[in-house]
Amino acid sequence: QVQLVESGGGLVRPGGSLSLSCAASGFALDDYAIGWFRQVPGKEREGVSCISSSGGKTFYINPVKGRFTVSRDNAKNTVYLQMNSLKPEDTAIYYCAAADGSSCTYRSLEVWGQGTLVTVSS
């Protein structure tokens, strides 16, 4: 099996925090950049963050800058997304995906997880 599995989603209050994990099985993550995406029903999937294979480069979209942090532990074959100061507009299904190479300037995303639901509500 070659797959990614997201975990860590749940229901949190505005201003709260969650840490998402993206665990790989069947392949080694250390060769691949990993992107985080989110999707709200009826809307287009949105890229959120990306981390290069080594962890040396990270990228974020403006709405999450300063609040989200992407990291990775290649020894654990896992990538993380720490989400702080969560807002209701962060509510979405969050997905991770492996790129076709080591860089966040990837051409395609070849392996996707099934997603984990993050709900931010009072």
Image (cartoon, rainbow, N blue to C red):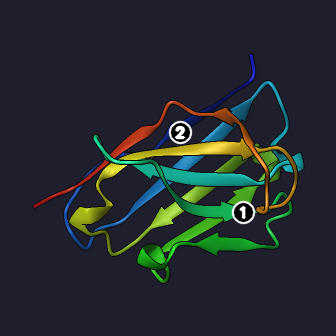
Q: Which residue is mark 1?
A: 51
What's the mark number on residue 66?
none
Against 103, residue 111 (above or below) is: above
Q: Position of residue 72 (x, y in %)?
A: 71, 58
Helix, strand or loop status at disc 2: strand
Q: Amino acid at mark 2?
A: Glu
Residue furthest to the bottom in view is 66
Q: Is residue 43 left or right of residue 6?
A: left
Helix, strand or loop status at disc 1: strand
For the N terminus, the quadrant is top right
Nearer the observer: mark 1 or 2; the answer is: 1
* Residue drawn at (53%, 39%) of the image: 6
Residue furthest to the top in view is 1
Gap between marks 1 and 2 measured at Cα: 16 Å
Of the numbered discs 1 and 2, the one sitting upstream in the chain is: 2
Q: Which residue is mark 2?
A: 6
Against 3, residue 45 (above or below) is: below
Q: Quadrant of residue 58?
A: bottom right
Q: Amino acid at mark 1?
A: Ile
